[in-house]
Image: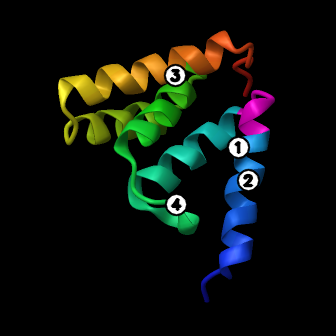
Amino acid sequence: MGHSEAMQRRIVAERLANAGIGRAANYYELGVDYSVGRHGVEIDLIEAHKWFNLAALSGDRRAQEDRAEVAAEMSAWEISEAQRQARAWLADGVALAA
């Protein structure tokens, strides 16, 4: 049974909040959400790559593999933009923590 729309929004909001305090497991889950359009978010490969990249930087091997899979479907510009967004996220002071 699927989640209600409100529950889906809450799941993504909680993951974003937890990612904001450096909880790396949420980086991976957000990457999955954006790569497949899970929990009510639109598929966004730039956003997915960004979250997989952050998870990979935290040592998540699944994220390394999934980032490569997503990158295979992206243009060089899109990959560059995803990397820029990941750097901006880190520059905003978010710590990478397991």
Q: Give how far across and how far down residue 71 sits, in percent.
A: 27, 34
**Image vertical order of residue 95 relative to residue 66, above or below:** above
Mark 1, residue position: 16
Q: Sequence-wise, which precedes: disc 3 or disc 1?
A: 1
Whether residues under marks 3 and 1 lie with C-beta atoms below 8 angstroms apart, the answer is: no
Count residues near mark 2 (Cα–Cα under 10 Å), then give few for <14, some for 14-19, many for 20+: few
The C terminus, quarter of image: top right
Q: Quadrant of residue 95?
A: top right
**Of the numbered discs in the image, which one, if any, rests on residue 35?**
none
Tell me the amino acid under the disc marked 4.
Val
**Callout 3: SS:** helix
29 sits left or right of 79 in the view: right
The N terminus, quarter of image: bottom right
Q: Which residues are magenta?
A: 18-23
Q: Sequence-wise, which precedes: disc 4 or disc 2?
A: 2
Q: Give how far across and how far down residue 77 sits, in percent.
A: 24, 24
Seen from the viewer's position, the closer of residues 85 and 25 is 85
**Of the numbered discs in the image, which one, if any, rests on residue 41?**
4
Q: Is residue 6 magenta?
A: no
Name the residue: 73% across, 53% down. 13
Mark 3, residue position: 86
Name the residue: 60% across, 84% down. 2
**Callout 4: SS:** loop
Q: Give how far across and how far down residue 4 sits, in percent.
A: 68, 82
91 sits left or right of 54 in the view: right
Q: Sequence-wise, which precedes: disc 4 or disc 1?
A: 1
Whether residues under marks 1 and 2 lie with C-beta atoms below 8 angstroms apart, the answer is: yes
Mark 2, residue position: 13
Q: Give how far across and how far down residue 15 sits, in percent.
A: 71, 48
